[in-house]
Every structure is written in C-alpha cells, then in structure tokens.
Amino acid sequence: MKLNELHDNPGATKKRKRVARGPGSGSGKMAGRGIKGQKSRSGVAIKGYEGGQMPLYQRLPKRGFNKPNRKDYAVINLGMIQKFIDLGKLGAEITETELVDSGVVRRKLDGIRVLAKGEITSAVQISVTGASKAAIEAVEKAGGALTVKAAAASE
C-alpha cells in the first residue's frame, strides 16, 4: 500500500451543499427555501411550533413548586467528621467555622447540617445549624454532644 492509494470508505465524506450560487447549481435563487413565508426569511426559529396545534409543552400538566426563599444547607456526614478528627484537623469542640477552616465543608451556605452516615467514635462537642435525630443519637452514644442552634433570622 502506498500513500497515494489511501482513500476513505465510499460515502464517508460528502461535499457541502452550496446554496444560492446561481441557477446552474440546482439550488440557486431561493436556495431551497421555497417562496415567501416565515421560514424563507433569515433569523427564524420556530422551535415549539406545531402548526397551530397546542404545543406539547403546553399540553403537559405543570407540577411542583420551587420555594424562592428555601434554606440551602451544607451537608456533612459523621464518618467524614471522624476521619478529620483522626487526621488531627479537628479537635474536641467543633463549630461551623472550624468545619469550614479545616476543609470538611467548602462553605457554610445557610448553615451546616450533620447526617448520621458513617460512625463516630470520639467524644466531641458539635455545634451546628441542623442535624438528623440519628446523628444526635450517634454522637451521644459515643459520649459527646451535638447541639443544634437556630439559624440567624437576619441571614
């Protein structure tokens, strides 16, 4: 095989259709757009239009509601807290600012919420905005305390 014998598979490449290049091209004058009408003009996008029929997005039922002022909590699991305690990045007293400073959570958002995934073996004092019942029980079982403080009303 030589370089000059290399070629693509038949039908692999196709020449681009050059429209509006005179009558000899086969698609000159109106460039295959037909005569007049909205779609023959430039800058037309008829996305959800179904020929006057009620479009699908209007026929389907609308469900749900997104609360505009809902709280967005940063979530942390007990297993991750224990891992950072073992690494020496967290002490016996843990607050939200210490969790952010140590890198357990990236940012506080509307507060930090502790969930019970993983195990905690250290007796620690944790003070956060929210916690699940299972997380509170797990920390107390390990000999520590998890206090949930109310989020500031001004935030």
Image (cartoon, helix red, strand yellow):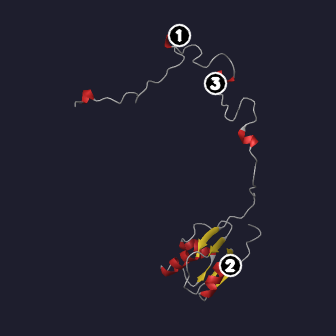
Viewport quadrant of the C terminus: bottom right
**Residue behind mark 1:** 23
N-terminal-most mark, 2 or 3: 3
- Mark 1–mark 3 Cα distance, whole angstroms, equals 21 Å
Which residue is most to the bottom? 143
Q: Mark 2 is on which residue type?
A: Lys
Identify the residue shown where x is 43% and y is 26%: 14
Q: Mark 3 is on which residue type?
A: Ser
* Labelled disc at residue 42: 3
* Labelled disc at residue 133: 2
In this rendering, does residue 53 appear at all? yes
Quarter of the image where one finds residue 149: bottom right
Q: Is residue 135 left or right of residue 54?
A: left
Q: Residues within 10 Å of mark 1 (few under 14, many from 20)?
A: few
Viewport quadrant of the N terminus: top left
Q: Mark 1 is on which residue type?
A: Pro
Identify the residue shown where x is 68% and y is 64%: 72
N-terminal-most mark, 1 or 3: 1
The spot of residue 64 in percent (x, y) is 75, 55
